[in-house]
Amino acid sequence: MALLTLAVAAWSFAHAKSEEQVNRARFAADGSVTRPIEWRQWVHVGSRYKPIGLNILDQKLTKTPEILNAYVEPSAMAVYQETGQWPEGSQIVKEFTAVQVGPGCDSKTFVCSTRFGDGIYESRYIGLGYMVKDSARFPEQPGHWGYFSFGHQPEPYLPTAQPTTTCISCHVTLASDTDYVISKAHLGLNRSTR
Ligand code: HEC
C-alpha cells in the first residue's frame, strides 16, 4: 500500500511538473494572441500536399497546390509523447507553403525539373494557422482549443490574431476521439508508430 501511495505520488508529481513546464502562448488584454516565434524549430510532425482548392485561413481558392507543415511546441510534445494527452497550454502551428510553378514545371503535376532533380518544390511561405489549448480562455470550446489565423499571405504574417470560430467544426467532425487534434493525419503524432 505504501508503495502504491508512493507510486501515485511520484506519478502525480511527474505529471504536474510536466504540465507546469509547458510553455505558454502570449495573450494581450484584448484577447488577441501574439504570433509565436521560431515555430520552425518546433517539432515537425508531418506535411500534407494539398491540391489547388480552398484554403482554410481565408476560404479562398489557392493559386497553386500548397504544402501544409504541422509543428508542435516541444514542451507540449514531450507531455503528449509521454501521456498521449495534450496538456494545458499546448501550441500547434500549421504553416502553408506555395509550390514552385513556371518554367520547367509541369502545370498539372507540379513536378519541376531542376538542377537538383525532379520534384515538387516548396517556393515560399504563404500562411500560418495556430491552435492553443487554454481552459481559462476557451472554456466553452471543444477540448478548450482556441484557433487563430495569422493570414494567408506571404511573410510577414500578421503579428497578432483574435480567436476565430470558423475552424472548430472540421476539427470536431474529424477528431473528436483524439482531442480535436487531427493526429491520425500526421505521421509524427501517430503514437503507434513509435
Ligand atoms: C475543412 C476542414 C478544416 C477546417 C475548416 C480547419 N481545419 Fe485545421 N485541419 C484539418 C485537417 C484535415 C488537418 C490535418 C491534416 C492537415 O494538416 O491538413 C488539420 C490540421 C490542423 C492543425 C495541425 C494539428 C491538427 O489538428 O492536426 C492545425 C494547427 C490546424 N489544423 C489549425 C486550423 C485553424 C487555425 C483553422 C481555422 C483558421 C482550421 N484548422 C480549420 C481540417 C480543417
Image: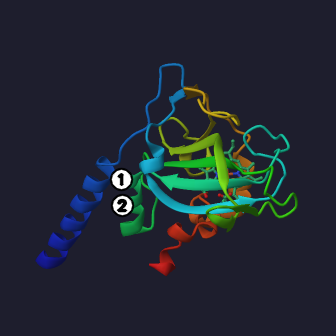
Tell which of 1 and 42 is nearer to you.
Answer: 42
Q: Which quadrant does the C terminus fall into? A: bottom left
Residue of label 1: 75
Residue furthest to the left: 2
Q: Is residue 129 above or below residue 75?
A: above
The residue lying at 29 percent from left, 60 percent from top is 15
Q: Which mark is residue 61?
A: none
For label 2, the SS is helix
Q: Secondary structure at mark 1?
A: helix
Q: Position of residue 184 (x, y in %)?
A: 61, 70
- Judged from this view, the residue extending furthest toward the top is 30
Q: How many numbered marks have been drawn onto this rendered protein structure?
A: 2
In the figure, is residue 118 to the left or right of 34? right
Specify how the rendered protein is coloured: rainbow
Q: Nearer the viewer, residue 22 or 4?
A: 22
Classify residue 110 as left or right of residue 73.
right
- Name the residue at the front extreme: 115
Q: Position of residue 151 (x, y in %)?
A: 67, 33
Picture residue at 83% right of the left edge, 47% below the top? 54
User: Residue at position x 57%, y 63% from top?
Assistant: 46
Q: Considering the image in quadrants, where does the N terminus appear?
A: bottom left
- Assess mark 1: CB under 8 A from ligand 1? no
| Disc 2: which residue | 78
Residue 62: x and y in percent read: 81, 45
Q: In the rendered structure, which amino acid carries the disc numbered 2?
A: Ala
